[in-house]
């Protein structure tokens, strides 16, 4: 929802990029192509992608999950940061958008790391759980339809290991979540999700004002899969 970090005026934002962004040519090309797409505003900001790369490397992640692929910028960032044996399960419903992603994954030489699952993400996540993959993922990134954020989070929390990290995009939603006059379905869904996660004892929480707002939810090592209300 944001191609740059929320609230920074252009001069300061450009300075931020000039002193920090190390974007490979393949990522820059994907970002530039996506910017011309009618839905290009859905692409994450480059500094956000680089931040996610660092998180994956800090965790020593090898198995990751992505819910919402679009044209593949975030998955390409993560794939480039993963070791040679790293894997991403990437969930999306659009063949059109992910055709662009596949092209860049191939060009970057990381297509072997990414398993694209086309179809409703909830179905894919439920299948992974049923197959016994709960607790086997190191990292999950949620950036899909906002009305299902809670459902995606609950399933991701089952799938990541204790000490695993879930990253949720668009939690500041261009500032609309802070305006009580804004009551559209997506804004209300994010606002409700943010409020619930604030009091969830199963995770250690931080909201980072990068891109359109990222929530980092670290699964506590003693966490159970009870509903939050049951643990209070």
Image (cartoon, rainbow, N blue to C red):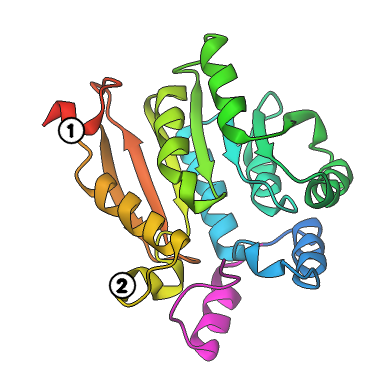
User: Above or below — where is 6 with respect to 115?
Assistant: below
Quarter of the N terminus within the rendering: bottom right
Q: Is residue 17 magenta?
A: yes
Q: Secondary structure at mark 1?
A: helix
Q: Is residue 40 left or right of residue 156?
A: right
Between the residue at mark 1 and the residue at mark 2, the CA separation in whole angstroms equals 24 Å
**Residue 202 location, quadrant:** top left
| Camera-side residue of 73 and 171 | 171
Quarter of the C terminus within the rendering: top left
Question: Which residue is denoted by mark 2 in the rendering?
Answer: 178
Question: Which residue is denoted by mark 1 in the rendering?
Answer: 229
- Residue at x 15% of width, y 27% of height: 231
Residue 114 screen position, x and y as percent: 73, 32
User: Above or below — where is 121 with respect to 136?
Assistant: below
Q: Is residue 35 visible?
A: yes
* Magenta-highlighted residues: 1-22
Residue lying at the far left of the rendered structure: 232
| Neighbour tally class for label 2: few under 14, some 14-19, many 20 plus, Cα within 10 Å | few
Q: Is residue 192 left or right of residue 5?
A: left
- Residue at x 74% of width, y 64% of height: 31
| Neighbour tally class for label 1: few under 14, some 14-19, many 20 plus, Cα within 10 Å | few
Q: Is residue 6 left or right of residue 106?
A: left
- Residue at x 60% of width, y 26% of height: 123
Residue 48 screen position, x and y as percent: 54, 60
Q: Secondary structure at mark 2?
A: helix
Q: Is residue 63 visible?
A: no
Q: Earlier in the sequence, mark 1 or mark 2?
A: 2
Residue 117 screen position, x and y as percent: 72, 31
User: What label does residue 80 carry, if any?
Assistant: none
């Amino acid at each position: 929802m944001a191609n740059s970090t929320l609230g920074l005026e252009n001069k300061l934002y450009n300075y931020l990029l000039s002193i920090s962004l190390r974007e490979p040519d393949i990522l820059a090309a994907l970002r530039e192509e996506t910017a011309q797409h009618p839905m290009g505003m859905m692409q994450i900001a480059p500094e956000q992608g680089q931040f996610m790369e660092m998180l994956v490397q800090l965790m020593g992640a090898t198995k990751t999950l992505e819910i919402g692929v679009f044209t593949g910028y975030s998955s390409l960032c993560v794939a480039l940061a993963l070791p040679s044996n790293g894997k991403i399960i990437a969930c999306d419903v659009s063949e059109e958008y992910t055709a662009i992603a596949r092209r860049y994954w191939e060009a970057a030489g990381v297509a072997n790391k990414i398993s694209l699952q086309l179809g409703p993400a909830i179905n894919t996540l439920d299948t992974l759980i049923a197959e016994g993959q709960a607790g086997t993922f190191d990292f999950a990134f949620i950036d899909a339809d906002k009305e299902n954020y809670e459902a995606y989070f609950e399933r991701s929390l089952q799938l990541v290991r204790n000490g695993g990290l879930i990253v949720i995009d668009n939690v500041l939603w261009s500032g609309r979540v802070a305006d009580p006059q804004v009551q559209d379905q997506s804004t209300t869904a994010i606002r409700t999700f943010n409020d619930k996660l604030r009091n969830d004892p199963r995770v250690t929480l931080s909201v980072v004002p990068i891109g359109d707002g990222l929530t980092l939810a670290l699964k506590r090592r003693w966490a159970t899969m009870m509903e939050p209300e049951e643990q209070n």
